[in-house]
């Protein structure tokens, strides 16, 4: 008996639909856990942001937008946003510049290249608290630190980093941690660079600077955009380095958004104000993430992110 021409296609569609339903069913537990994990804390934070809730005076009440108006009308929020922008921008610039330079150098045929690569990547695996303590006590201390000893050798006055240029000191510590990450990503990307193209450019008389500018750097454009996106997400939440070294000071010179939320909640005991600050931080982080993802998608071309 002859079958209708569309019978086979209909059977395939039914099989595909059944497979899709089974896949959704298998994914349901994991998706449900992720939704509860993300939505419940965000919903509680949003609810507390409209409450007049202080840990010293728990019996508060509905505050409306008072927490937001107080937060947006104060100096601390805008100073912390500016500090966050400076810290993220400075660390990103140092990571991309020094990470690119280090990756290019480690891609050369050097003696002990494997050991050098391991040593260059090692700081990324040091805990932020440990690295902050090392830099604070062993390197940047104005009396007993290594930099102070080097300054004395050349008859210069040591710099009191955490008093005179505290945000720069925090940036140095954070950059020291994240430059190895950029180096690792960019060094991996350099492994896929067409060496025939480099040799052809060399035979045509192109020098090292020209080869880097017109061949290596365009090849690294996409990896650099990925590094910028990933590092920005993590740099927006820098906290341990500030807590260990400056505690947000002097004054509010090194207070960023995460530390402002911490200070409001656990030092001033103002849960409502801290929750409002957390919501503001989430909104700003999502705005930044949106533009970063779009820029990465554009740099990836038609096959990039959708």
Image (tube, helix red, strand yellow):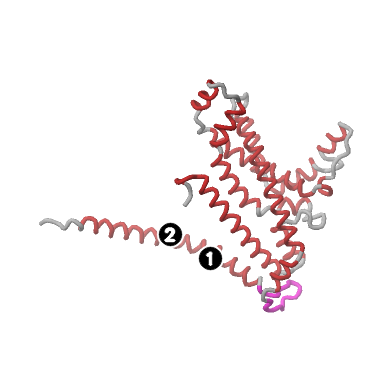
Q: Split into 4 quadrants, where in the image is the N terminus? A: bottom left
Q: Is residue 267 left or right of residue 93?
A: right
Disc 2 marks which residue?
27
Is the stretch drawn in magenta largely helix, strand or loop? loop
So how many labels did they put on this image? 2
Is residue 287 positioned above or below 173 on the image? Answer: below
Is residue 2 positioned above or below 66 on the image? Answer: above
Nearest the camera: 97 or 128?
Answer: 97
Q: Residues within 10 Å of mark 1 (few under 14, many from 20)?
A: few
The structure residue drawn at horizontal position 79% and vertical position 40%, both measured from the top left corner, is 139
Residue 196 is situated, as x and y percent measured from the top left of the image, at 49, 26
Which of the two labelled residues, at mark 1 and mark 2, occupies the earlier sequence position?
A: 2
The structure residue drawn at horizontal position 58% and vertical position 42%, both measured from the top left corner, is 224
- Decide whether residue 205 is among the magenta residues: no
- Decide whether residue 55 is among the magenta residues: yes
Q: Secondary structure at mark 2?
A: helix
The structure residue drawn at horizontal position 75% and vertical position 43%, both measured from the top left corner, is 134
Q: Distance of mark 1 from mark 2, alpha carbons? A: 14 Å
Residue 42 is situated, as x and y percent measured from the top left of the image, at 59, 66
Q: Residues within 10 Å of mark 2 (few under 14, many from 20)?
A: few
Disc 1 marks which residue?
36
Please provide the residue range marked out in magenta.
50-63
Residue 239 is situated, as x and y percent measured from the top left of the image, at 70, 54
Is residue 207 positioned above or below 182 on the image? Answer: above
**Most distant residue in the left direction:** 1
Query: Which quadrant of the view contains residue 260?
Result: bottom right
Q: Secondary structure at mark 1?
A: helix
Residue 234 is situated, as x and y percent measured from the top left of the image, at 63, 51
Question: Which numbered disc covers residue 172?
Answer: none
């Amino acid at each position: 008996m002859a079958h209708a021409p569309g019978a086979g296609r209909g059977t395939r569609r039914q099989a595909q639909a059944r497979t899709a339903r089974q896949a959704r069913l298998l994914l349901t537990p994991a998706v449900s856990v992720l939704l509860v994990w993300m939505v419940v804390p965000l919903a509680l934070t949003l609810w507390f942001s409209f409450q007049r809730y202080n840990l010293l005076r728990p019996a508060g009440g509905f505050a409306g937008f008072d927490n937001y108006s107080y937060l947006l009308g104060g100096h601390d929020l805008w100073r912390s946003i500016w500090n966050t922008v400076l810290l993220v921008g400075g660390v990103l610039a140092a990571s991309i510049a020094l990470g690119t330079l280090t990756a290019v150098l480690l891609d050369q045929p050097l003696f002990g290249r494997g050991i050098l690569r391991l040593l260059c990547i090692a700081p990324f695996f040091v805990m932020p608290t440990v690295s902050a303590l090392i830099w604070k006590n062993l390197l940047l201390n104005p009396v007993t630190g290594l930099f102070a000893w080097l300054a004395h050798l050349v008859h210069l006055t040591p710099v009191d980093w955490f008093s005179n240029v505290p945000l720069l000191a925090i940036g140095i510590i954070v950059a020291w941690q994240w430059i190895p990450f950029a180096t690792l990503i960019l060094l991996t990307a350099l492994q896929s660079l067409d060496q025939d193209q480099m040799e052809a450019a060399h035979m045509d008389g192109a020098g090292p600077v020209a080869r880097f500018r017109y061949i290596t750097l365009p090849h690294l454009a996409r990896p650099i955009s990925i590094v910028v996106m990933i590092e920005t997400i993590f740099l927006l939440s820098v906290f341990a380095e500030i807590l260990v070294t400056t505690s947000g000071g002097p004054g509010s010179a090194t207070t960023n958004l995460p530390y402002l939320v911490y200070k409001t909640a656990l030092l001033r005991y103002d849960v409502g104000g801290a929750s409002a600050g957390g919501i503001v931080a989430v909104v700003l982080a999502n705005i930044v993430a949106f533009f970063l993802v779009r820029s990465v998608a554009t740099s990836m071309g038609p096959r990039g992110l959708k």
